[in-house]
Image (tube, grey):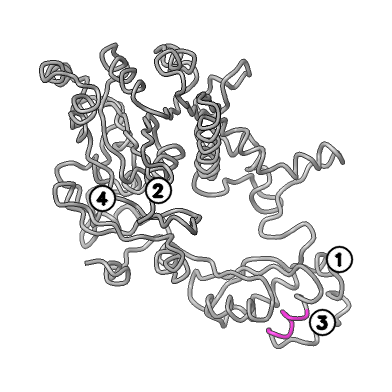
């Protein structure tokens, strides 16, 4: 197998929740050794929601959360209490033998601990540091705010343009900006490594999620700058394409989207619906007319789509030259032949000594390298599993020193009582319910009892 791009690179991952944990997980796919640092007083994995595989929390629910295992694949685990000097010293010692530090604390934290970039380069002059914050370092009025993607969508303007006309601003989905930060962080790390290879110098990456969100609403910002126009919410519609929308299909709660961008696509849609008389209807003959009569078109298309399977509708319209896409739920996504053919979904088997989870499907990468086949290397290690590897094999701490760190709870392999983030424990199900269905009774979710068979899992 060809050498992976980041083999030989060691990364300290002192991050929480989603954006940077996911970025560092992808870096393990690329060959980097990633050491995840979390405290038993404040473990990242305990914050993950989603229950446990098959509702089995086991004796260590903090190691079993699906989201945590998805994001942190193949990482080693070192526990350190960074609020105490002994923990910070071990962190600093690890910096001396590492290449990259990734952290997502508010700006004051690393500075207070004397582990910000000006201090880390004293320990290792060519260190690369990625600091992912909500609003960036500096003197801005928001700089000290803790960041969370779910609230930043409001502040950078995405909520203002998301939602239906004459309705309230809405979120775009599940922590949209986290994905932007993840992918942008990967790009920035690659650039910093290239710079170091050419100059032998490190670099500090100051990544502000707020600015990423603004970047992805840039056309609306520019429209205001140039035209003074304050755009609002369009729902599923488009400023100049028509018709565009999300239409009901035959099965309950099944939908398919379409977007007609020009007259040729309009003709193709009319013919596919078996309504050629609409082509020359004066109401719909021009884009402006179709925009003005969009409500009428929505009723016409819905009457047709309601008799179709969503995937059949997608295939028929695509074959006719009309952009269309069935709305996938997560079952559809996991069973998508296209995702599997792209290598985006992978089956990963957990060793028995790591939670006895078995074989599961994890999300890979949204891109491929034609000369370097990539795959998820292994599951994430259990909490504190690599304490002795890091402290003794890498840092050459003595048995006595490690024992003292364990005794004083600087390190450990279980969250301690009173930890700021307690392990997620699924609610007690009602009669006839699994823990999973108990959690989904107020949502549109459902439990598929045949999911393992469908996914090809033992």
Q: Are marks 1 and 2 in contact (CB under 8 Å)?
A: no
Residue count near mark 3 (Cα–Cα under 10 Å), binned few <14, some 14–19, many ≥20: some
Residue tagged by mark 1? 288
Q: Earlier in the sequence, mark 1 or mark 3?
A: 3
Residue at mark 1 to residue at mark 3: CA–CA distance = 14 Å
**Horizontal and vertical percent position of residue 228:** 85, 38
- CA distance for labels 3 and 4: 54 Å
User: Earlier along the polypeptide chain: callout 1 or callout 4?
Assistant: 4
449 vs 173, left or right, is left
Judged by its main secondary structure, the magenta piece is helix
Residue on which disc 4 sits: 52
Q: Is residue 55 left or right of residue 34?
A: left
Residue 339: x and y, percent?
45, 65
Tell me where residue 373 appears, x and y as whole percent: 41, 57
Residue 442 seen in the figure? no
What kind of element bears circle 3? Answer: loop
Residue 232 - label: none
Residue 105: x and y in percent read 44, 24
Real-space Cα separation, disc 1 to disc 4, in angstroms: 52 Å
**Considering depth in this image, is 329 or 131 the residue closer to the camera?**
131
Provide the residue designation for mark 2: 4
| Magenta-highlighted residues | 267-272
Is the residue 162 above or below the residue 221 in the image?
below
Q: Quadrant of the C terminus?
A: bottom left
Q: Which mark is residue 279?
A: 3
| Front residue of this view, candidates 67 and 421 | 67
Q: Residues within 10 Å of mark 2 (few under 14, many from 20)?
A: some
**Which of the 4 image quarters holds residue 177?**
top right
Q: Quadrant of the N terminus?
A: bottom left
């Amino acid at each position: 197998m060809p050498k992976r791009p980041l083999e030989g690179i060691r990364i300290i991952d002192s991050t929480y929740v989603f954006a940077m944990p996911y970025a560092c997980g992808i870096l393990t796919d690329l060959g980097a050794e990633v050491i995840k640092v979390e405290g038993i007083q404040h473990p990242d994995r305990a914050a993950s929601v989603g229950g446990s595989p098959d509702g089995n929390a086991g004796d260590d629910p903090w190691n079993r959360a699906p989201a945590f295992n998805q994001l942190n694949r193949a990482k080693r685990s070192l526990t350190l209490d960074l609020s105490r000097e002994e923990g910070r010293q071990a962190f600093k010692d690890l910096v001396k033998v590492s290449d990259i530090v990734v952290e997502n604390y508010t700006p004051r934290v690393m500075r207070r601990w004397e582990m910000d970039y000006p201090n880390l380069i004293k320990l290792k002059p060519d260190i690369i540091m990625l600091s992912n914050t909500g609003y960036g370092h500096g003197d801005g009025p928001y700089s000290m705010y803790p960041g969370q993607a779910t609230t930043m969508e409001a502040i950078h303007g995405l909520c203002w343009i998301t939602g239906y006309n004459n309705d309230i601003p809405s979120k775009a989905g599940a922590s949209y900006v986290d994905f932007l930060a993840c992918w942008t962080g990967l790009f920035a790390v690659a650039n910093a490594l290239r710079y170091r290879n050419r100059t032998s110098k490190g670099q500090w990456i100051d990544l502000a999620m707020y600015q990423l969100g603004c970047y992805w609403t840039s056309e609306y910002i520019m429209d205001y700058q140039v035209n003074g126009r304050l755009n609002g919410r369009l729902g599923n519609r488009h400023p100049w394409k028509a018709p565009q929308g999300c239409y009901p299909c035959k099965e309950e709660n099944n939908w398919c989207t379409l977007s007609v961008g020009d007259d040729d696509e309009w003709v193709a849609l009319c013919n596919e619906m078996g309504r050629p008389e609409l082509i020359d209807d004066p109401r719909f003959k021009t884009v402006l007319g179709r925009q003005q009569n969009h409500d009428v078109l929505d009723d016409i298309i819905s009457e047709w789509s309601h008799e179709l399977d969503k995937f059949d509708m997608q295939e028929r319209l695509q074959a006719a030259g009309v952009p269309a896409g069935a709305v996938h739920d997560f079952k559809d996504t996991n069973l998508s032949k296209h995702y599997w053919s792209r290598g985006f979904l992978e089956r990963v088997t957990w060793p028995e000594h790591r939670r006895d989870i078995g074989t599961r499907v994890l999300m890979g990468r949204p891109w491929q390298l034609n000369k370097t086949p990539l795959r998820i290397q292994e599951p994430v290690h259990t909490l504190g599993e690599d304490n002795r590897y890091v402290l003794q094999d890498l840092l050459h701490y003595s048995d006595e020193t490690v024992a003292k760190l364990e005794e004083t709870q600087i390190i450990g392999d279980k969250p301690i009582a009173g930890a700021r983030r307690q392990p997620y424990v699924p609610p007690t199900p009602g009669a006839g319910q699994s823990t999973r269905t108990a959690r989904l009774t107020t949502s549109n979710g459902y439990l598929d009892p045949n999911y393992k068979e469908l996914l090809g899992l033992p």
